[in-house]
Image (tube, rainbow, N blue to C red):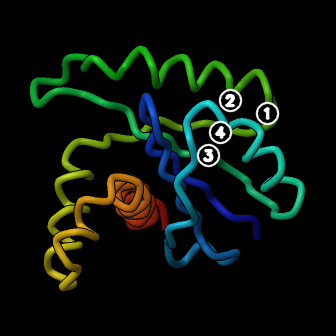
Amino acid sequence: MARVLAIDYGGKRTGIAVTDPLQIIATGLTTVPSKELIPFLKQYFAGEPVERIIIGEPKNWDDTDTHATPLVEACIRDLKKNFPAMPVEKVDERYTSKMAKQSMLESGLKKKDRRNKALVDEIAATIMLQEWLGRNP
């Protein structure tokens, strides 16, 4: 089986998580500068089979678009242009950053480490992917 890759896209940074090849568990992969996402994915896909990309869709509590929605839509267009055979699926990303920060707090990370926004983005992508796995057994 191939992996599923999750993207928590942001204006500056993008958190990335992947499943294991059996698609049982999600693991944080890395955080890359958003402008380097496509080159990073080209290199990653050259070495790892990936069958699907899921990307966090930013929405407000009332389902309206956020300021980040146009950025994510542009990223989706870039993904489809560069990887036309790869399915790209939008998933709800509400509260994933908040959940990531709470997870960091509960795991005992020092305050300095909890301020690492790149780590928050990577954990948010992991949470998003693990939730997707739970809905798609």
Asked whether, in this view, residue 100 is left or right of residue 126, the answer is: left
Asked if marks 4 and 2 touch (Cβ < 8 Å), the reply is no
Q: Which is more foreground, mark 4 or mark 3?
A: 4
Say if mark 3 contacts mark 1, CB within 8 Å.
yes
Q: Of the residues tagged 1 and 4, which is closer to the observer?
A: 4
Q: Position of residue 17 (x, y in %)?
A: 53, 61
Q: Nearer the viewer, residue 76 or 29?
A: 29
Q: Nearer the viewer, mark 4 or mark 2?
A: 4
Q: Earlier in the sequence, mark 4 or mark 3?
A: 4
- For the residues labelled 4 and 3, the Cα–Cα distance comes to 13 Å
Give the distance between the C-alpha atoms of the residues marked 4 and 2, in whole angstroms. 9 Å
- Dot 1 falls on a residue whose secondary structure is loop
Residue hosting label 1:
83
Q: Are discs 1 and 4 less than 8 Å apart at CB?
A: no
* For residue 82, above or below residue 19: above
Q: Residue at x 48, y 51 (%)?
A: 15
> Crowding at label 2, few (<14), some or many (≥20) Cα neighbours within 10 Å?
some
Give residue 53's mark. Answer: 3
Q: Are marks 2 and 3 in contact (CB under 8 Å)?
A: yes
- Residue bearing mark 2: 79
Please tell me which residue lies in front, 90 or 30.
30
Say which mark, if any, is on residue 37.
Answer: 4
Left-right relation of 13 to 57:
right
Q: Amino acid at mark 4?
A: Leu
